Image: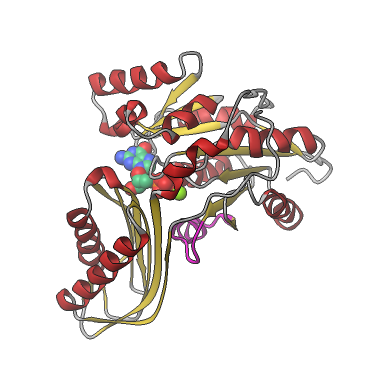
């Protein structure tokens, strides 16, 4: 808000698909607004219509989308940040990389702080770990554990869902991968830990960490084993439709089709003048993220689906299309203006890389 200050506080908040990044950044934006700090977000994904962006805009936050990993589109990422600075003059910019991103410290955080120290005060790189899935860190996947090793601060999410033993186990799983990194357990539902994260954002603590001996190519197979499905449609009701029932049925269709370990994150929103619902499926856990207005609608609604699943793209596309057909059978609706994209993203090389 201070026009004479040229430096904008900047924080990159990484972490795996479904860990809780978007929910946290939107919650942080609200808390910072209460402190009279103006916040803007940069979301990052692949696909043409993003539930995250819609959700953040719906919460009244200024959002820019960058398509393709920040690391390989660094000039565009920087352009978005500068445009936010010029247009909305935020005190703080929060940036959320794609959940499968690796080497964000070496390819985004470090280049930003080395190259643009007069423009951005870059906070320590924070990585969100899903408290309910921390045991995943010792599983087959390389990416979640690597993200934790890169972190300067680990944010352990969803602790409202953990009892004391489960919280200890989650902390233990994180400490095994990153024994010397600060961990902040938090919940957006109870607000535990949120103030500690806000304190870092409003402090002048800077990112300092550097990684050496990194090879971003080792993650390529894991990235390519996942597929991205995104779809939008206008729901035309013939009769009253239950927005909650529709989104739940859709997610149950996905949970019944794919093993839970393969379901990284599926997000769906339904928004009309009368009703709004957002739901997420992470593994086999479905959660209502927000309901707005009434539960029922009979006016046209916008449907957005983003699914990130370990599967061949044809298999995912076919499954999602048959789930959408099933919705038309179970609910008094038609789907109009359908758009769809389904693919396995091809990882590309970072623009800058300090990790060698
Ligand atoms: N119970 C609980 N759920 C959370 C919390 N933070 C996020 N979630 C849920 O976790 C799911 C994934 O969150 P999202 O922010 O979209 O994850 P992202 O993929 O990392 O951006 C959503 O259903 C959120 O509502 C939390 O602190 N507690
Ligand atoms: Mg997100």
Which contiguous range is marked in magenta? 46-62
Specify whether residue 60 is painted magenta.
yes
Count of numbered badges drawn on the protein: 0
For image coordinates 44% across by 35% down, the residue present is 143
Is 275 left, or right, of 217 in this rendering? Answer: left
Farthest residue toward the bottom? Answer: 238
Determine if residue 284 is in view. Answer: no
Q: How is the image coloured?
A: secondary structure
Determine if residue 52 is in view. Answer: yes
Looking at the image, residue 261 lies above or below residue 64: above
For image coordinates 39% across by 69% down, the residue present is 231
How far from the left and from the top, in percent, is residue 52? 46, 55
Looking at the image, residue 111 lies above or below residue 74: above
Q: Nearer the viewer, residue 188 or 213?
A: 213
Specify whether residue 320 is painted magenta.
no
For image coordinates 73% across by 33% down, the residue present is 113
Q: Quadrant of ligand 1?
A: top left
Looking at the image, residue 85 lies above or below residue 328: above
Is 275 left, or right, of 181 in this rendering? Answer: left
Q: Nearer the viewer, residue 113 or 348?
A: 348
How far from the left and from the top, in percent, is residue 257? 20, 57
Dividing the picture into quarters, in which one does residue 317 lie? Answer: bottom left
The C terminus, quarter of image: top right
The N terminus, quarter of image: top right
How far from the left and from the top, in percent, is residue 239? 20, 83
Q: Nearer the viewer, residue 2 or 74?
A: 74
How far from the left and from the top, in percent, is residue 7? 78, 39
Farthest residue toward the top? Answer: 180
Is 250 left, or right, of 270 in this rendering? Answer: left
């Amino acid at each position: 808000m201070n026009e004479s200050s040229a430096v904008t506080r900047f924080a990159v908040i990484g972490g795996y698909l479904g860990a809780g990044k978007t929910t946290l950044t939107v919650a942080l934006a609200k808390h910072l607004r209460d402190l009279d700090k103006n916040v803007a977000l940069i979301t990052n994904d692949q696909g043409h219509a993003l539930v995250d962006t819609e959700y953040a805009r719906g919460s009244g936050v200024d959002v820019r989308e960058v398509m393709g990993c920040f690391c390989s589109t660094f000039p565009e990422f920087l352009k978005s940040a500068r445009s936010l600075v010029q247009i909305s003059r935020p005190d703080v910019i929060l940036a959320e990389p794609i959940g499968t991103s690796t080497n964000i410290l070496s390819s985004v955080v470090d280049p930003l702080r080395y190259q643009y120290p007069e423009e951005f005060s870059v906070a320590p790189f924070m990585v969100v770990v899903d408290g309910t899935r921390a045991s995943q860190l010792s599983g087959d996947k390389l990416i979640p554990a690597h993200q934790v090793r890169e972190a300067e601060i680990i944010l352990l999410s969803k602790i409202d869902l953990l009892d004391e033993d489960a919280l200890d186990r989650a902390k233990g799983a994180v400490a095994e991968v990153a024994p010397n990194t600060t961990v902040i357990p938090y919940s957006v539902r109870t607000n535990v830990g949120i103030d500690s994260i806000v304190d870092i954002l409003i402090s002048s603590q800077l990112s300092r960490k550097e990684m050496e001996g990194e090879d971003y190519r080792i993650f390529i197979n894991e990235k390519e084993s996942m597929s991205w499905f995104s779809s939008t449609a206008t729901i035309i009701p013939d009769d009253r439709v239950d927005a909650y029932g529709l989104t739940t049925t859709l997610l149950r269709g996905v949970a019944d089709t794919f093993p839970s370990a393969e379901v990284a994150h599926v997000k769906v929103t339904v928004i009309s003048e009368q009703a709004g619902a957002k739901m997420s499926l992470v593994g086999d856990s479905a959660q209502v993220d927000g309901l707005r207005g009434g539960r029922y609608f009979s006016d046209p609604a916008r449907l957005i689906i983003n699914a990130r699943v370990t599967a061949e793209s044809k298999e995912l596309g076919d499954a999602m299309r048959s789930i959408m057909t099933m919705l038309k059978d179970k609910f008094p609706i038609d789907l109009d203006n359908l758009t769809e994209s389904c693919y396995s993203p091809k990882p590309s090389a970072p623009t800058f890389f300090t990790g060698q």
